[in-house]
Each structure stands twice: as structure tokens, then as C-alpha cells.
Amino acid sequence: MSREKRVDFCEQCRQKSHYTLQKRKVEKQMKDKVYSFEITVAVCDACGEEMGLPELIDRNIQEIDEQYRAYEQIISMEDMKKLMKIYEIGKSPLSLALGFGEITMTRYLDGQIPSKEYSDVMRKALFEPTFMKQKLIENKEKIASTAYTKAMNAALKLEELFCVSEKMLRVIGYLFERLEEVTPLMLQKLLYYTQGVSYAMKKKPMFVEECQAWQHGPVYPEVYRMFKDFKYNPIDDPRFVIFEGTEDALTLEERKIVDLVVDTFGEYGGKVLEKITHQEIPWQQARTGYSKEMGCNEKISKESIKRYFCDKDEEYGFSTEKGIKKYIQTMLKS
């Protein structure tokens, strides 16, 4: 039940009354099939009857549309918009690239529900850049060269995302969602500490990727290549819109780990985090024999990360913000 209270005319009470917005289940038959939908209704606080408010009509239509698409596994309006955004392509050229009629995407974005067949094509293009590349090549002659080039370049860049594990992608996406600004250097350190806190709390890694002991601290090479063009600037990458609203791909425990990292290590910039990693045993051991200025791609073993962070968990308590913040302050004073 919503706590939101407003006033409008109640036909039962024949006067203006306070009402409360509530969720109510309704059944509707669509295409010879009965569906149960949950919609928002206004209930009069005085008599308990529903009040027919015109402003709820559009809201109810949207609620039913979203739930119907979920029932039938039809792509959502938001995902169709993401498809256009990540491939930097307009409605008409996207329609042609996917093998549809020229105004098909326009109709869908105006509210028409696509068939399951067309929905599956759009969903596959959204999550499989290799498939989108194939469709672009197949329909190249139908699309203006500028639109084709932009979409193909976007597909090639999107492919780079899938050189790391899905778990790594989800963690990166969640870090972007939680933080206003993240530079490549800061991202590398937050991923490293996510791995470390995962070992401290679960005794197992968050993701399978190996990191290396580079000059500026632990680095995941695949992630470096993904974002190297941003250099020291905050990452503003339209490719990650693909993961917006999909944080449920991480378990509650995994999100808790990332939240702990964001609320502690995430309060510092990349250079401060680099300074802390330089004082930690895993990075130091991996760089044995290397001077501070020398390049190095030696692997920081998962076992050394696990051992270090499990030890620090016993000393500080890495399952709490208080414990991690105490560790950070200790390291910064060293």
C-alpha cells in the first residue's frame, strides 16, 4: 500500500475525500488467454471504494503492458530504447538492419507490442553484438553508410565487453550504478577490493579473472583494454546501459560485498587507492625483483589475495563498514 494521500471527488461519498493508492489484482482476457495483472487503484479513505480517476488510466495501461510483456517474454520498451542507444542508431535504420519494415521500430516505440519472433530478434541483437554485426552485414545495402558505420563500430566495441566473465560485467555495471564518477584507475582498485572482500566474507572469489601487479597497483588487463581510451577521465560508456536495471543478476550477498566496497574504498580516488595497494603484501610479492618504475605483468595469485584478506578480516572485521574503514585509515597513516 502506498502512503501517498491525495484528495479527489468520490462518487460514492458524493464529496471530495482523501484517497490512498493501492495495488489490486485484475484479470483480463487477451488473445484467448486470461492474465492476472497488478494495477494501481485509488481507494477512498472514507468509504473504502475505488475512485475512478482519469489520471490513473495511462498508468494502468503501462502496468498491464509491462506485465504482459513479462508473461510472454516480449522485449520491453526500455530494452528497445537501449538497443538504439548502444548501437547509436535511429529507429528506421535499426528496423532495416534487423530485417524489419522501415517503420516497424517506430510502431513498437509508439506502443504496439511486437510478435514473439521479432521480439527475440531484438533481444538477441541487444545481448549478442556478434548477432547484430551479422544482421548489419546482411542488410548493409538497405542502410545509409553513416548509420551502418556508426552501428558497426558500436557493435565491435560492445564485443569487447564480453571478453570478461558475466560476473565481472555485472560487478562493473553495479559499480557504475552506485558511483557518480569512476575513472579507469579507480575502477581497477575497486574490482581488486571487491575480490578481496569476497575472499574475506565468502572464502571464494567474486569473479574468475586474474589480476596483474602493474606499476600503479593491481590491474585486470582485460578491463584495462576495455576502458583505456578514457585514460585518467571518468568513464562515460554508453555500452553499460545494457545492464541498467539488471542488478538482480548479482545475489544479495554479492551486492552486499560490492556495497561494502563502494561505501568504504569507494570514498577515495584512484591515486589514494593505489597508495594503499602498494602497501599490501599481494602486490608487493608479485613485484619482487622489480623497481617502482619498472613495468610488470606478473600475476597476483588468487591464493595470495585470499590469504591476505582473510588475515585482515580476522584483524579488522571486513564484513562491516567500520572494520574496513579502520583498515583504510591504518593504511593511510603508514
Image: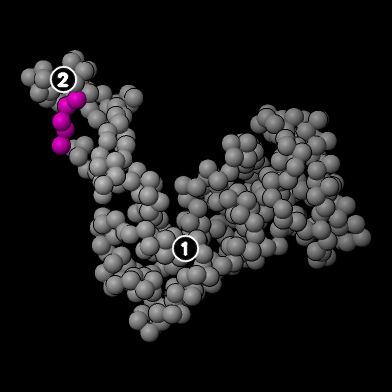
Q: Nearer the viewer, residue 174 or 107?
A: 107
Q: CA separation, marks 2 and 1? A: 49 Å
- Give the magenta-colored segment's residue range: 50-54
| Label 2, residues with CA under 10 Å away: few <14, some 14-19, many ≥20 | some
Residue under the point 42% across and 64% down: 121
Instruction: Give the residue at mark 2.
Output: 17
Q: Position of residue 83 (x, y in %)?
A: 41, 62
Residue under the point 63% across and 40% down: 254
Q: Position of residue 67 (x, y in %)?
A: 35, 43
Instruction: Give the residue at mark 1.
Output: 124
Q: Position of residue 10 (x, y in %)?
A: 12, 23
Q: Position of residue 265 (x, y in %)?
A: 66, 42
Residue under the point 44% across and 74% down: 135
- Label 2: state its secondary structure: strand
Answer with mark 2 or mark 1, whichever residue precedes in sequence.
Answer: 2
- Label 1: state its secondary structure: helix
Foreground mark, 2 or 1, reads 1
